[in-house]
Amino acid sequence: DADVTQTPRNRITKTGKRIMLECSQTKGHDRMYWYRQDPGLGLRLIYYSFDVKDINKGEISDGYSVSRQAQAKFSLSLESAIPNQTALYFCATRGLADQPQHFGDGTRLSIL
Amino acid sequence: AQTVTQSQPEMSVQEAETVTLSCTYDTSESNYYLFWYKQPPSRQMILVIRQEAYKQQNATENRFSVNFQKAAKSFSLKISDSQLGDTAMYFCAYLSYNTDKLIFGTGTRLQVFP
């Protein structure tokens, strides 16, 4: 089983719909992150959380919200999806400060 | 704010040859980490190699090694004996000690030809 699991793997939806992307981890890490990947732009940070009560905006948080339901779960929501939110979304976790981030397999989201 | 620049959008190399991917970064911090991640067509993000800024010795992982030049703020990745399975997008990333944010470059697409 994967250490960082993202669901769904792929999703196609329409403009204006509310979408939730879910991330769960079995690594016991406190730190969790949501990134967006667009062609030619690399990965950009949307939100991050250092523990259940500590949630922070990243560089591109507008149009997104998150929920840290438990140490192991961190969800990303698009309240009213728009086509320019079409992208590949990654969840990542990190444990100790000197350790690298571990990524899920990504959710490819297409908004028509 | 820190930035990471990968100036080579695409590169190609023949199987068994050596290729070097470039990365430069800008920061005023003295302590940080640098990473290279590989993203194959399967889209997973796979850690290739990491470097702590306080270490002068260049990191090495099997066929992958880095040339870390702290003063020049350069962090290149060398892949020796290239294999078809090395075909992927490669991202350079900077991790700030202070903010715990991972900042990515825009990536270099590497194609390995038989």
Image (cartoon, rainbow, N blue to C red):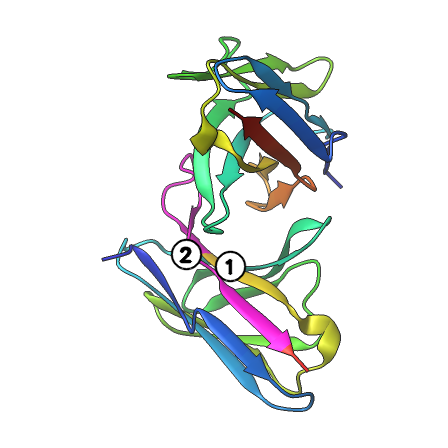
Q: Which percent across, then down, holds residue B29?
A: 67, 29
Q: Is residue A93 magenta?
A: yes
Span of residues in magenta? A92-110
Dot 2: element: loop
Quadrant assignment, res B106: top right
Image spot of residue B22 (x, y percent): 68, 23
Is A6 magenta? The answer is no
Residue A88, quarter of the rendered image: bottom right
Residue A90 - label: 1
One can see residue B58 in this view: yes
Q: Which one is nearer the viewer's eye here, A65 or A44?
A: A44
**Which image quadrant for residue B8?**
top right
Residue B60 lies, with reference to residue B99, above or below; the image says above
- In the depicted view, which residue is nearer to us: A8 or A69? A8
Up/down of B63 relative to A20, above or below: above
Contact between labelled residues 1 and 2, with CB atoms less than 8 Å apart = yes
Vertical placement of A16 versus A47: above or below? below
Which three-letter amino acid code belongs to the residue tagged 1? Phe
Q: Nearer the viewer, residue B104 or B56?
A: B104
The label number, if any, that marks residue A104 in the structure image: 2
Q: Is residue A12 above or below residue A31?
A: below
Residue plotted at (53% across, 31% down): B35
Helix, strand or loop status at disc 1: strand
